[in-house]
Amino acid sequence: AQSVTQLDSQVPVFEEAPVELRCNYSSSVSVYLFWYVQYPNQGLQLLLKYLSGSTLVESINGFEAEFNKSQTSFHLRKPSVHISDTAEYFCAVSESAGNTGKLIFGQGTTLQVKP
Amino acid sequence: NAGVTQTPKFRVLKTGQSMTLLCAQDMNHEYMYWYRQDPGMGLRLIHYSVGEGTTAKGEVPDGYNVSRLKKQNFLLGLESAAPSQTSVYFCASSYSRAPSTDTQYFGPGTRLTVL
């Protein structure tokens, strides 16, 4: 069975500071990895995903995540955060061999950006 | 395009009452999903559908039923609501060319309280 652990439930940070949101997964099969973001009172939207190739993936708004197979991690980073990045961030995995698209989500990390 | 819409946005039920949540998508997506979001637990899959007329159980299906009579609609039913079903419910859809890698598009959510 697959599982996803987000090690921090809340991450407070000041504006323009760097941030890292940690994600570890457990799976006996190959997986694809996703980060979704949920802004206040909205549904989730995809931030970025790792499918194959380069282990470093980037989003259009400056976030990046690195797939580390040996450490089974997919941590999300941003070198300088903005107030508008305040949101809840979810790491998720899907089984690469499956045909259902089922996602297993982590518990979520609330990023609080302070002025 | 409206994307994924959910009806209603809020609902308060008494224990034992029944209700149906409606999810609609206008993107011609094959796959649809129902999740529930609870504090500290992330999102958990309730039921999903890989096409019109099909449904399957997810991680936490007990107490819920679903139907997919039309491709664009996915209904979630609670026959006899319980306080443990107090949650925020999200619907999502994906195109399904490669389900495990596809982006899921989420609705805005339905906040349900069962007294």
Image: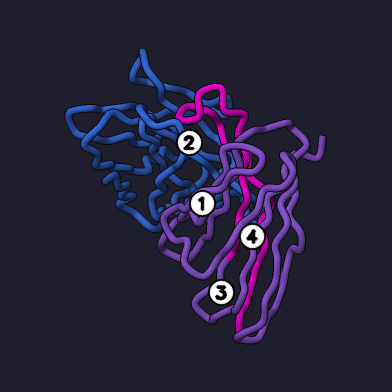
Q: Which amino acid does label 1 sit on?
A: Glu
Output the chain of dot 1: A
**Residue A10 occupies which quadrant of the picture?**
bottom left
Distance from label 2 to label 4 (Cα)?
19 Å
> Circle 4 sits in a helix, a strand or a loop, which is it?
strand
Residue corresponding to mark 4:
B76
Q: Name the residue under label 2.
A: A101
Q: Does the magenta stretch include residue B41?
A: no
State yes or no: discs 2 and 4 in contact (Cβ < 8 Å).
Answer: no
- Identify which residue, A22 or A115, lies in the foreground: A22
Q: Which chain is represented by blue in the image?
A: A
Q: Chain B's shade in the image?
A: purple
Q: Is mark 1 on a helix, strand or loop?
A: strand
Task: Give the residues drawn in magenta, as a range.
Answer: B88-115
Report the amino acid beneath label 4.
Leu
Q: Position of residue B80 (x, y in %)?
A: 60, 79
